[in-house]
Every structure is written in structure tokens, then in C-alpha cells.
Image (cartoon, helix red, strand yellow):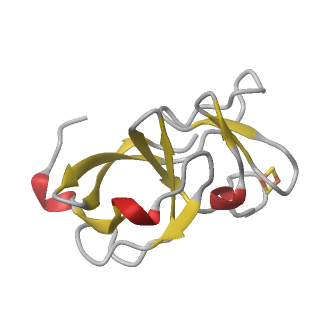
Amino acid sequence: MTTNEDDFGPLCTLDQIRKGEGRHFRPTGGRWRNKAMAVFEENGEYFVTNFICPHSGGPISEGKLVDGVVECPWHGWKFHVDTGLSADKEDGHAVEVYETRIDGDTLMVGGLKRPTK
Ligand code: FES
């Protein structure tokens, strides 16, 4: 996917993100302004997924992140936060994931990395 600089908008500051835990934010600008998103950090890398689980609408930001996999708190579906692909079901549903970059102390969110199946 080609990066479009106009897609990027500020999502949160880095000090608002907690290791191993998701947080829920809405971009204040860019293509996804006001869209609910889940943010995770692991080993100094930042990951942004859709806030809503593709199974039944659970809050993915409330799931725990372990070894790059988040588990939805409602029914336990698991997703790789880098690709959005299912981590526990062959041909399982994917969650939307987004490009990120850091601008000063701000995490910016940009284009869709992979559409939901
Ligand atoms: S809503 Fe996420 S697993 Fe059911």
C-alpha cells in the first residue's frame, strides 16, 4: 500500500500508551479523524487497530497484548496487531490495522495496512 501523507493525523501522545495494555483513542485529524482506534506498544513498537472487534463488536483496546497478539476481552478471538490477521483461526476474520509514525512526542496514524476480510 502506498503511504499518503494526507492520511496521517495525531492519535495520542506516547506517554499516554501503556506497555502490554491497549488504550482507546480517536485521531484529532487526518483521514480517520474521530474514528475509534486501539493502540498498543510492545518492545518500542506501536500498533494501531480498529477499536471494534470484527466478531461481535468487542472493545479490542481492552485486550491484553502478548507476543504481538491481542485477545479480544469478550469471546477470546486473537489477532496479530502488526497484520490484523487472525492468530487462532485459519482463514479467520481480520481486524483493520493502520500505518503509524512518530512526530515528536505524538503517535500519528495513517493509511489502512490491511482491509478487514
Ligand atoms: S466480540 Fe471480540 S471475540 Fe467476540
Q: 45 above or below 59?
A: above
Residue that protrudes farthest toward the right in the picture: 75
Nearer to the camera, 67 or 58: 67
Q: Is residue 17 left or right of residue 102?
A: right
Q: Where's residue 78, x and y in %?
A: 73, 37
Q: Quadrant of the N terminus?
A: top left
Q: 11 above or below 1?
A: below
Residue visible at 61% across and 39% down in the picture = 94
Residue visible at 58% across and 40% down in the picture = 117
Residue visible at 47% across and 59% down in the picture = 17
Q: Where's residue 9, x and y in %?
A: 23, 66
Residue visible at 79% across and 41% down in the picture = 77
Specify the quadrant of the image occupied by residue 86. top right
Total numbered badges shown on the rendered structure = 0
Q: Where's residue 109, x and y in %?
A: 31, 57
Specify the quadrant of the image occupied by residue 114. top left
Q: 17 above or below 36?
A: above
Nearer to the camera, 1 or 21: 21
Residue that protrudes farthest toward the left in the picture: 5
Q: Where's residue 87, x and y in %?
A: 69, 27
Q: Is residue 116 left or right of residue 63?
A: left
